Image: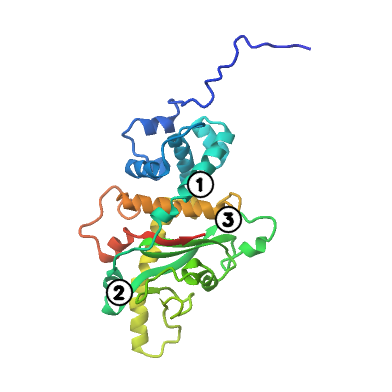
Amino acid sequence: MNVHFLSQPPNPRRYGQLTITVPLIRLFFDGQSDLRVDFRLSRGSFNALMEAIGREADHGWDPEIACLVFLFWLASGTSYRVVSRAFDMPRTSVHRAIHTTNGKIAALFAQTVHHPTEERVGFARLAGSAAFNRVAGSTDGFHVRVKPPAADSDCYLNRKLFYSVQLQAVVDRTPNVCVGYTGSVHDSRVLKNSPLYLEKQYPQPGYCLIGDGWYPCLSYPMTLMTPYHQPLRNQLQAAYNSRLTKARGVVERAFGILKTRWRAIFLKTLEVDILFVPEVILCCTILHNICLSRGAILFFPLWPRQAPPHPAPDWLSCALDSNIVYCAC
């Protein structure tokens, strides 16, 4: 039997040390490069995030490095193995950094996703009718593709014939969401089992929400206005439906911005443990609100390489200021 001895003992300090030669880490520490390409957050948004979750650590990797690892994984939607090679870190460290940072960001939910305190009048302007002055938000939902679990996979098969988890949100220029229901559950059932409905969280008395035809028209415990169903009886109903569609379109555009920022999560199949899916989606909405609070708006899907037109149209100014105001898991 041949026995080989190391000429020098391994250096115990090498493990966990920062490798500044890694391109992604060097990109961050040069202080000038645009982080949005690889991490989807601007430097201002990243600094605001770090101030919220804290920069102190008593052991392990530096919180900034762990946060970069999490954001890169979230932005690229790739495997832990690829992230491990990109950062020159052990795969177990990548797993720990992603799940630890995800938990810290999810704890910011109450600070970043909350009901507005001031009166909103933007929906009347969007609809072109003073009848919508008392509208406090627009609600809708969409399906996030997931890899279904081996057990009860049929529960995740939605009406569009793919496996998903649902995200329900209320948008008024700041979104609020309910995430976690399986794809087979109807939108109205998601609403009636959410804290928004059960706990009468929103809107405040005297105000109402608006939604599409998948939701029921309600007056209690919350007020929800929906369009008239076909066939319409008169021109008054047609005019109401038209105004309502214009007003509630802000939630669709808010979803468009959210999906564009985290396209690897919302436009592809999310291949993580099904119990981890709601937390990942929740973190995306929290980061979306943090970015908007810092003015980090994604202009490039609408105007590549140039600033938006001035003044921006009403529907656009509302969409680009669409935080998520209701979100619950």
- Residue 144 locus on image (x, y percent): 52, 58
For image coordinates 52% across by 52% down, the residue present is: 279
The kind of residue on which mark 2 rests is Ala
Report x, y in % for residue 37: 39, 42
Whether residues under marks 2 and 3 lie with C-beta atoms below 8 angstroms apart, the answer is no
Dot 2 alpha-carbon crowd within 10 angstroms: few under 14, some 14 to 19, many 20 or more = many
Image quadrant where residue 129 sits: bottom left
Q: Which residue is mark 1?
A: 103
Expressed as whole percent of the image width and height from the top left, the position of residue 168 reads 48, 64
Furthest-bottom residue in view? 233
Q: Nearer the viewer, mark 1 or mark 2?
A: 1
Q: Could you tell me how far apart the alpha carbons at marks 1 and 2 are, in whole angstroms?
A: 39 Å
Residue 248 sits in quarter: bottom left
Above or below 84: residue 135? below
Q: Which-is-in-front pick, marks 1 and 3?
A: 1
Q: Is residue 299 visible?
A: no
Q: Mark 3 highlights which residue?
A: 146
How many angstroms separate mark 1 from mark 3 (CA)? 20 Å
Q: Secondary structure at mark 1?
A: helix
- Disc 1 + disc 3, Cβ < 8 Å: no
Quick one: which residue is furthest to the top in this view?
7
Tell me if I can see residue 8 in this picture.
Answer: yes
Amino acid type shown at disc 1:
Gly
In the rendered structure, which disc, 1 or 3, sits on the residue that comes first in sequence?
A: 1
Image position, residue 27 (x, y; %): 38, 32
Residue 213's label in the rendered image is: none
- Out of 198 and 314, give the one closest to the viewer: 198
Residue beneath disc 2: 127
- What distance separates the C-alpha of mark 2 from that of mark 3? 35 Å
Amino acid type shown at disc 3: Val
